[in-house]
Amino acid sequence: MTNAKGLNPETAILGTGQNVLDFWQWGFSNIITNNLRGIFAEFLVGTALGSLDQSRKEWDAFDLVYNDMKIEVKSSAYIQVWHKDKYSNISFNIGAKKEYDYETNKYSDDVKRNADMYVFCLLKEKNVELVDPLDISQWEFYVVLTTELDRHFPKQKTISLSRLKQVTKPCTYENLKNIIDGLL
C-alpha cells in the first residue's frame, strides 16, 4: 500500500469510484493553511537537500535527516486563510520537547530540542492577491544550529523573526543547501 515514495495517486479507493489523487485534491490543495504550509515547508527543505527518501512521520522529534543531521523545519506566514485584515506576527515554535520513540511507544525522560539544526521557512509575500506558496521566490529560509538556539534562547518556547535575525540571515531556496552544508 505505502512505501518510501508513498501512495500511487492512481490507487483506487475501493467502493467509491475515486482514487488517491481525488482525495489529495479535495483535502490538500489549500497549502496556505498552517498545517499544510508547514508540511509543504518540510517538503521544500527536503527537496533542496535531496533528502526525501522516507515518507514523512507525523509528530516525529524532527522532520528530516541530512548527512546524519536531524533537521527541524518550522513555517510561518504574514497572510493566513482565516483573516486577511492584518498581517500575522511572525514567530516560530522552538520549545524543548520529549522525544517519542515509535519502536517502544514511549516518550524520553529528558526534555530538549531534539534536532541538530532548525530551518525556519517564511512565506514572506504580504499581498493577499499575489501570495502563492508554490512560488519559491516568495519564501525565505533561516538556518540555525540547535547549539546556537540553546546558547542564545535556552528557555524560550517561541522566537520572533526579529530575534531570529539576530543570529542568522535569510537565504533563498537556491542557496539553502549550501548554507546547511557550510554548517556541517
Image (cartoon, rainbow, N blue to C red):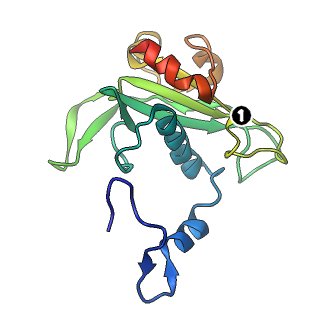
Measuring from the top left, give residue 152's x and y in whole percent.
Answer: 47, 10
Measuring from the top left, give residue 73's x and y in whole percent.
Answer: 48, 34
What residue is pinned by disc 1? 137
Residue type at mark 1: give it: Ser
Most foreground residue, 33 or 7: 7
Q: Quadrant of residue 181?
A: top left
Q: Is residue 157 visible?
A: no
Measuring from the top left, give residue 164's x and y in whole percent.
Answer: 58, 18
Most foreground residue, 80 or 125: 125
Most foreground residue, 150 or 123: 123
Left or right side of 126 for 20: left
Left or right side of 58 for 105: left
Secondary structure type for disc 1: helix
**Viewport quadrant of the N terminus:** bottom left
Could you tell me which residue is drawn at 43 percent across and 66 percent down? 8
Measuring from the top left, give residue 135's x and y in whole percent.
Answer: 71, 42
Most foreground residue, 92 or 26: 26
